[in-house]
């Protein structure tokens, strides 16, 4: 058994007393500098301490904590791993290693490391809560529950424990209870930016965009350097019927200016590409999985001309599925970057010699927009994942089309140059399990069924008012609506329609469905109603594939014009309204045109099959032509076609 002296020697190495005193002074400096908010100086002091004593556990743990605060999970994990090697029974070292492993997506390692930390120090609340979060990240609510309960037993008024309990409730579908826990956490600790952010997400998903915006703005005020909080705010703004497209664009520009000042680009790389070599395209996304974005990316990937282009995919998500497998098999190069630092990802892109780096996330989470601020590729592009400007001055182009972003209207809303593809910015791949369209239900019972299966967060007060008008004008019509399944939201919607005289039997509220049930719901409906100002993309294509025409309201911003881009491609340009009154009029006329509904039910799938919306080969050629032109103009200001 090690003696106290041998434990001290292992903990502090075999340095001289003078060296030990120097290290102790430096570690005190580290603590003082941390408290003063001088992170860079604290890191430097810690590095000096480790230069004197590389195995000092206190210095290694301090370094891991500093790296953790900076989001450098690889550095944090390395320092914590060295601390564990130096002193295997050190609880904090195991905690820091487990915490860093969790952020890297190595959840089994995280659970093991945090479990060991709790064995060594059972009452460490931070470890109990971190283990709870690791289980929740892994989708194991049952595994998380005992650890959050232990933390609450130890400290009932812990704001961090309230956040963990909120996550547990959220994972088990108790959304109103989760909201209450996040509010409680904020009341206990007004500096809880995490609680404000999580509250904002639930409010946004329920359609409460004003409250969500306030929550995200409170989180940003507390942690302005966390880019993901800004992204969360921007998604709420896109769904708000009270924020203009120009105001939203201005907020994006402010984000870009702030983070461009914080994150300096890498030095320009010398051009080493042979004149006639393949153009190297890198796609960076969190959605190379069963996700809406993949439904538009896979047709492009499958049709890429691999004789002229070398394709690299960088995947920013911890979980893989069958879609991930298909993309991995098709791409020439596939790398997981989940948990890697922005600098590490940028360095990998630079090492791979990527000519054009394409963002497929925008501000949807989790994204890697800070990587693009490092400018690892000579040309940088954004497409499909976020239908608006990123606000980043280092992204050169956004791929779009002239209907989604009309010339002269959209430029003022973007920091990127808009590269308008000649046919469409979309290429849709239907679900394999999509059933054949059934006979239009209006023909069976003589009453119209409207449907909106868009994300519930897109349903705002303006849309509810318009849908209520529709139900008043079309006698006996029903509305099928996808909602966030929280009692407060469901009750609020029921009260809204009841107060306008709409009988309960005319309203069907649906929670989350399987893909099969979701597609079959379209079979039971006649007319799909798009949302505004955040229109549907995948839901619009899914409805059309199932034979259900979609009525859309086109606004100024890109998000409001997805339907305006898609519908003319299948001959339904007349279903694009340019005002709220026109939206109601178009939907009423369509609902009353029984012969047209029946004909569309029979023909829409074949129309889509023969349209540019499903022509992957033509779409890939358009995108490739755009990439080649961008590359040829790489040394000039962004040029438009």
Image (cartoon, helix red, strand yellow):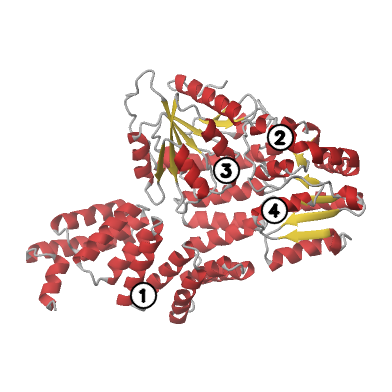
Q: CA distance from mark 2 to mark 1?
A: 58 Å
* N-term mark: 1 or 4: 1
Percent position of residue 50, x then y: 18, 57
Which structural element holds mark 3?
helix
* Front residue (pair 268, 628): 628
Residue of label 3:
293
Q: CA distance from mark 2 to mark 4?
A: 19 Å
* N-term mark: 4 or 3: 3
Quarter of the figure with the N terminus: bottom left
Q: Using a 10 Å C-alpha cutoff, classify the residue at mark 3 as few (fewer than 14 neighbours), some (14 to 19) or many (20 or more).
A: many
Q: Which mark is residue 124?
A: 1
Q: CA distance from mark 4 to mark 3?
A: 18 Å
The residue sitting at the bottom extreme is 153
Percent position of residue 422, x then y: 63, 24
* N-term mark: 2 or 3: 3
Q: Using a 10 Å C-alpha cutoff, classify the residue at mark 4 as few (fewer than 14 neighbours), some (14 to 19) or many (20 or more).
A: some
Which structural element holds mark 2?
helix
* Position of residue 94 in the picture relative to residue 360 (left or right): left
* N-term mark: 1 or 3: 1
Q: CA distance from mark 1 to mark 3?
A: 41 Å
Q: Using a 10 Å C-alpha cutoff, classify the residue at mark 1 as few (fewer than 14 neighbours), some (14 to 19) or many (20 or more).
A: some
Q: Residue at x 46, y 81 (%)?
A: 153
Residue of label 4:
518
Q: Is residue 318 above or below residue 405?
A: below
Residue 535 in view: no
Which structural element holds mark 1?
loop
* Front residue (pair 396, 548): 548
Percent position of residue 60, x then y: 24, 61
Q: Using a 10 Å C-alpha cutoff, classify the residue at mark 2 as few (fewer than 14 neighbours), some (14 to 19) or many (20 or more).
A: many
Q: Which mark is residue 608?
A: 2
* N-term mark: 2 or 1: 1
């Amino acid at each position: 058994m090690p003696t106290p002296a041998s434990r001290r020697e292992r903990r502090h190495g075999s340095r001289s007393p003078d060296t030990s005193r120097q290290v102790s002074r430096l570690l005190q400096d580290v603590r003082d500098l941390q408290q003063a908010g001088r992170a860079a100086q604290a890191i430097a002091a810690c590095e000096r301490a480790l230069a004197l004593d590389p195995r000092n556990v206190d210095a290694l743990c301090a370094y891991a904590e500093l790296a953790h605060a900076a989001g450098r999970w690889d550095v944090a994990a390395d320092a914590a791993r060295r601390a564990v090697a130096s002193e295997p029974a050190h609880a904090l070292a195991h905690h820091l290693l487990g915490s860093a492993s969790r952020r890297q997506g190595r959840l089994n390692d995280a659970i093991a490391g945090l479990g060991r930390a709790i064995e060594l120090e059972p009452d460490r609340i931070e470890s109990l809560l971190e283990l709870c979060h690791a289980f929740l990240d892994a989708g194991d609510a049952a595994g998380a529950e005992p650890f959050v309960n232990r933390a609450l037993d130890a400290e009932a008024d812990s704001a961090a424990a309230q956040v963990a309990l909120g996550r547990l409730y959220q994972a088990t579908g108790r959304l109103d209870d989760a909201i209450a826990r996040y509010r409680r956490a904020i009341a206990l600790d007004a500096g809880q930016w995490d609680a404000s952010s999580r509250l904002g997400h639930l409010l946004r998903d329920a359609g409460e965009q004003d409250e969500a915006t306030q929550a995200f703005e409170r989180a940003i005020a507390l942690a302005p350097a966390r880019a993901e909080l800004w992204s969360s705010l921007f998604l709420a703004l896109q769904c708000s019927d009270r924020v203009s497209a120009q105001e939203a664009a201005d907020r994006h520009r402010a984000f870009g200016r702030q983070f461009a000042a914080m994150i300096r680009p890498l030095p320009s790389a010398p051009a080493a590409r042979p004149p006639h070599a393949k153009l190297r395209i890198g796609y960076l996304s969190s959605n190379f999985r069963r996700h809406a974005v993949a439904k538009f990316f896979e047709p492009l990937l499958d049709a890429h001309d691999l004789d002229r282009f070398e394709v690299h995919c960088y995947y920013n998500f911890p979980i893989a599925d069958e879609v991930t497998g298909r993309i991995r098999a098709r791409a020439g190069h596939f790398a997981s970057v989940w948990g890697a630092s922005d600098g590490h990802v940028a360095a990998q892109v630079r090492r791979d010699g990527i000519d054009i780096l394409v963002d497929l996330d925008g501000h949807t989470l989790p994204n890697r927009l800070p990587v693009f601020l490092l400018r690892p590729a000579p040309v940088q592009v954004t497409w499909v994942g976020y239908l608006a400007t990123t606000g980043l001055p280092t992204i050169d182009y956004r791929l779009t089309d002239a209907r989604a972003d009309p010339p002269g209207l959209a430029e003022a809303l973007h920091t990127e140059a808009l590269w308008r593809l000649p046919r469409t910015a979309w290429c849709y791949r239907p679900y394999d399990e999509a059933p054949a369209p059934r006979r239009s239900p209006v023909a069976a019972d003589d009453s119209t069924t409207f449907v909106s299966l868009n994300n519930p967060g897109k349903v705002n007060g303006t849309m509810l008012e318009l849908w209520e008008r529709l139900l008043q004008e079309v006698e006996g019509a029903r509305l099928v609506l996808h909602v966030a399944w929280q009692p407060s939201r469901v009750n609020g919607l029921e009260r809204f329609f009841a107060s306008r005289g709409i009988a309960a039997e005319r309203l069907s509220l649906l929670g989350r469905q399987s893909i099969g049930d979701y597609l079959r719901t379209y079979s039971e409906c006649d007319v799909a109603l798009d949302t505004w100002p955040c229109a549907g993309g995948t839901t619009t294509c899914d409805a059309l594939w199932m034979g259900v025409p979609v009525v859309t309201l086109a606004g100024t911003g890109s998000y409001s014009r997805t339907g305006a881009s898609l519908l003319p491609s299948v001959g339904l340009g007349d279903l694009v309204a340019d005002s709220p009154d026109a939206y109601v009029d178009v939907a009423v006329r369509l609902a009353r045109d029984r012969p047209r509904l029946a004909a569309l039910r029979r023909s829409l799938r074949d129309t889509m099959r023969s349209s540019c919306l499903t022509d992957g080969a033509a779409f890939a050629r358009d995108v490739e032509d755009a990439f080649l032109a961008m590359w040829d103009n790489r040394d000039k200001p962004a040029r438009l076609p």
